[in-house]
Image: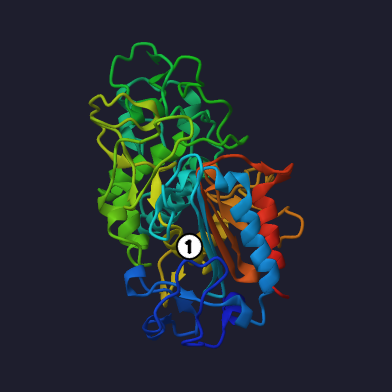
């Protein structure tokens, strides 16, 4: 942390902000007087209604190549993956907003994408959840750790006693530890049937609700879609990207803390870094994925909830469930690009905001490193809810990310003091045969002078 801070000390140039590359609007001069500088000279943005991020004209910054920065933003804005259904990009360097741009799509998405548009961050939600999980593991360390069994050997030893209401569908589930569900090594299947168009079918001897937790437990599934009654492999021995172990640990968090995941994470993290109260209170059940574009945007920030009557998460039919509502761990976190940049900036600063350590630095360290299996191997580029991107040519190998469907990503590079947030509604991965995300961050990095 000390090395990071020493790299990040910079002169507070109050009043220097101006229109950045692609910037929609610059902040009023008085907002600079409200700038939050901590005891070690690091800037943290106040809430948006109090001024928000400081905007800088890259032409006046000696450490930015303004031409290459403009090329990076133009690459983003003109790619079909952005022009089709809209997109947003925010670039923060040394706590300075040096580029911000919004693209209104030609084929869906927000009718006029602006700095106030809230887009579903899709699976980048997992990293938000993982941040809350890190705080939870610290707060309740006397009850649970990464090595704690999730399902347990009995109802009495289980973090999720609800799963014992039916016979355990696979004995290997009793070996799932908390570390396995947070690292995608629990053995759960991966497909996410959000639209739920196939026929629903019960697991043997189960006659209950077609709802979210019942789906995660493996008690029902869609015909032709991988079910969760049987694990794909022994927990901890392989990797499979899946929401469903994570959802079960989110239930454990609710069981122990008494709060829904979103409320808990807001109170501990999102509120203190200046994100809007609607992320705590606006918890929507209907997932408005009306077609295969899976569009989900609004002018109001919010977090989806699953379970119980009225919810269609993961294809649930809105039936009544005894297990109640909980914020969805795997997706549906909807906010502005500017506000998601706050989270990415918190991660850049290893869980610190101003002079308060909201998330343990040790958690951020382990969460953003490749998960180490019991045999010492690290074959997958995934930590605890974060992607470890240490193999992109032309990009420092300390890059880590939150990643979501439709390329709703955040890129964090501590060695460059750099945060990039990208939102969108189109999941095309390549542009002219080149990986879009890799090319984008490579172009941004090229604009940061050594």
Horizontal side of residue 185 vs 112, given as left or right: right
Position of 21 with respect to 26 (left or right) is right
Quadrant assignment for the N terminus: bottom right
Q: Is residue 447 visible?
A: no
- Mark 1 Cα shell of 10 Å, populated few (<14), some (14-19), many (≥20): many
Say if 181 sits above or below 396 in the image: above
Q: Nearer the viewer, residue 47 or 140?
A: 47
Q: Nearer the viewer, residue 140 or 365?
A: 365
How many numbered marks have been drawn onto this rendered protein structure?
1
Instruction: Provide the secondary structure element on which disc 1 rests.
Output: helix
The quarter of the displayed image where residue 380 is located: top right
Residue 430 location (% of width, % of height) = 68, 42
Determine the residue located farthest toward the top in the rendered image.
Answer: 204
* Percent position of residue 148, x then y: 44, 44
Q: Which image quadrant is residue 25 in? A: bottom left
In depth, the one of 302 and 77 nearer the eye is: 77
Q: Quick one: 271 or 48, which is closer to the camera?
A: 48
Position of the C terminus by quadrant: bottom right
Q: Position of residue 218 (x, y in %)?
A: 42, 23
Residue at 33%, 52% in the rendered image: 299
Task: Give the residue number, with chain letter if any, for mark 1.
Answer: 341
Q: Image point 50% across, 81% down: which residue?
A: 17
Residue 165 seen in the figure = yes
């Amino acid at each position: 942390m000390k090395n990071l801070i020493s790299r990040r000390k910079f002169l507070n140039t109050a009043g220097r902000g101006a229109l950045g590359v692609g910037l929609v609007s610059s902040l009023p001069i008085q907002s600079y007087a409200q700038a939050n500088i901590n005891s070690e000279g690091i800037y943290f943005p106040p809430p948006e209604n109090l001024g928000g991020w400081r905007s800088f004209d890259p032409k006046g910054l000696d450490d930015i190549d303004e031409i290459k920065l403009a090329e990076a933003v133009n690459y983003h804005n003109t790619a079909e993956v952005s022009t089709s259904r809209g997109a947003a990009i925010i670039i923060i360097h040394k706590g300075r907003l040096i580029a911000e741009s919004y693209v209104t799509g030609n084929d869906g998405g927000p009718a006029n994408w602006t700095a106030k548009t809230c887009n579903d961050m899709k699976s980048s939600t997992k990293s938000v959840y993982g941040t809350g999980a890190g705080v939870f593991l610290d707060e309740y360390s006397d009850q649970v750790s990464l090595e704690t069994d999730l399902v347990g050997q009995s109802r009495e030893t289980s973090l999720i006693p609800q799963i014992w209401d039916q016979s355990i569908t696979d004995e290997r589930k009793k070996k799932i530890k908390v570390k396995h569900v947070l690292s995608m090594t629990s053995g759960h299947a991966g497909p996410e049937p959000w639209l739920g168009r196939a026929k629903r079918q019960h697991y043997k001897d189960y006659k209950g609700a077609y709802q979210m937790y019942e789906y995660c437990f493996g008690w029902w599934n869609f015909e032709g879609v991988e079910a969760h009654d049987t694990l794909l492999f022994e927990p901890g021995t392989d990797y499979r990207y899946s929401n469903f172990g994570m959802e079960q640990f989110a239930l454990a968090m609710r069981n122990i803390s008494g709060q829904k995941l979103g409320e808990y994470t807001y109170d501990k993290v999102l509120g203190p870094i200046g994100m809007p109260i609607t992320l705590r209170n606006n918890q929507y059940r209907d997932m408005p994925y009306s077609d295969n574009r899976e569009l989900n945007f609004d002018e109001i920030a919010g977090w989806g909830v699953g379970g119980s009557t009225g919810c269609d998460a993961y294809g649930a039919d809105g039936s009544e469930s005894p297990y109640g509502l909980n914020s969805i761990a795997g997706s549906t976190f909807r906010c502005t690009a500017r506000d998601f940049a706050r989270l990415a900036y918190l991660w850049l600063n290893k869980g610190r905001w101003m002079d308060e350590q909201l998330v343990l630095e040790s958690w951020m360290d382990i969460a953003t490193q490749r998960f180490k299996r019991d045999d010492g191997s690290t074959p997958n580029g995934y930590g605890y809810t974060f992607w470890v991107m240490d193999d992109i040519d032309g990009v420092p190998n300390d890059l880590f990310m939150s990643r979501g469907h439709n390329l709703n990503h955040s890129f964090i590079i501590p060695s460059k003091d750099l945060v990039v947030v990208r939102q969108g509604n189109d999941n095309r991965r390549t542009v002219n045969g080149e990986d879009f995300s890799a090319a984008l961050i490579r172009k941004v990095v090229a604009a940061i002078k050594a």
